[in-house]
Image: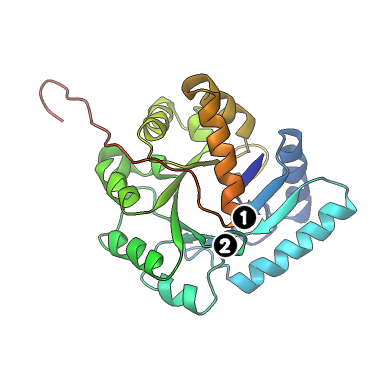
């Protein structure tokens, strides 16, 4: 398996705090069948800033350590950037690290808000030659309440990534159900761990893919796995036309 979203680089955000934590995470990932991890430290989220050159340096260091410890996991460089008005400038001046140096760029929203300029920014990212991948939309309360927001973004060319723990029910039954709805509606294209450690925010990729297979079939499982490979290769991923998610009425009221 390939995990395209993980906070495994040590000491630079709220993920692994020391190299021992990084090695433990990599070992756990390997035991779940993960052989490649895209390291995606936070950037511009109000607490952490991690720019491209630093990420490349730390990724090389961790790969060297993994080889020394004989842990069969390869780390690729990435970044989880909170949406902000300077993203295009940062892409152009080399501060933003696309996923494995491809055309794909992670875009994060806060947990309860989608800014009014998001539509324009996602468009501008595409005009700049990149493809925005919206991370964990199922955990955003504004999108949960109004899925049409995400539908429009995907219809206009953005991709999305659902968290493995969401699909496995670790964030509650409502987020689990919404994650399945996004899959059914062709509104998400990747599953990734967003792992921060080996305890409270672990990988659970094996559980998530089992859930995906049980609920959506083996073909969908292969599609999501293939999309992760296509992404790190910089190739076009599999996607179908997104369908709107209709909120059920309760006593005649939405």
Q: Is residue 82 above or below residue 15?
A: below
Q: Residue furthest left?
A: 252
- Asked if residue 76 lies left or right of residue 129, the reply is right
Tell me which label, 2 or 1, sits earlier in the chain: 2
What is the secondary structure assignment of the residue under circle 1? helix
Q: Position of residue 61 (x, y in %)?
A: 78, 63
Tell me what residue is drawn at x 38 percent, y 30 percent: 184
Q: Is residue 113 above or below residue 176?
A: below
Residue 115, image quadrant:
bottom left
Tell me what residue is drawn at x 76 percent, y 64 percent: 60
Q: Position of residue 49 (x, y in %)?
A: 54, 68
Question: Callout 1: few (<14), some (14-19), or many (20+) C-alpha neighbours within 10 Å?
Answer: some
Q: Is any part of residue 54 visible from this angle? A: yes
Q: Position of residue 247 (x, y in %)?
A: 23, 30
* Residue 233 numbered mark, or none: 1
Tell me what residue is drawn at x 40 percent, y 66 percent: 125
- Asked if residue 30 lies left or right of residue 97, the reply is right
Q: Is residue 146 above or below residue 120?
A: above
Task: Please report contact status of discs 2 and 1: CB closer than 8 Å, yes or no.
Answer: yes
Q: Position of residue 132 (x, y in %)?
A: 43, 58
- Judging by the rendered image, the residue that carries numbered circle 2 is 102
Q: How is the image coloured?
A: rainbow
Image quarter hosting the N terminus = top right
What is the secondary structure assignment of the residue under circle 2? loop
């Amino acid at each position: 398996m390939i995990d395209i979203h993980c906070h495994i680089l040590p000491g630079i955000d709220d993920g692994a705090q020391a190299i021992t934590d990084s090695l433990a995470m990599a070992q756990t990932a390997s035991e779940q069948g993960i052989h490649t991890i895209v390291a995606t430290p936070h950037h511009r989220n109000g607490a952490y800033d991690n720019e491209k050159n630093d990420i490349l340096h730390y990724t090389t260091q961790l790969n060297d350590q993994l080889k020394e410890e004989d842990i069969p996991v390869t780390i690729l460089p990435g970044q989880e950037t909170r949406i902000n008005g300077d993203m295009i400038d940062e892409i152009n001046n080399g501060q933003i690290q696309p996923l494995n140096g491809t055309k794909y760029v992670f875009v994060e929203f806060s947990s309860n808000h989608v800014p009014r300029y998001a539509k324009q920014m996602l468009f501008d990212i595409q005009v700049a030659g990149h493809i925005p991948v919206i991370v964990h939309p199922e955990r955003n309360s504004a999108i949960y309440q109004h899925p049409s927001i995400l539908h429009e973004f995907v219809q206009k060319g953005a991709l999305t990534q659902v968290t493995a723990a969401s699909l496995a029910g670790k964030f509650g039954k409502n987020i689990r159900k919404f994650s399945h709805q996004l899959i059914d509606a062709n509104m998400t294209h990747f599953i990734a761990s967003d792992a921060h450690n080996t305890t409270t925010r672990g990988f659970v990729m094996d559980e998530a893919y089992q859930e995906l297979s049980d609920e959506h079939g083996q073909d969908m499982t292969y599609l999501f796995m293939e999309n992760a490979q296509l992404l790190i290769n910089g190739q076009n991923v599999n996607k179908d036309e997104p369908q709107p998610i209709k909120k059920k009425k309760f006593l005649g009221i939405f």
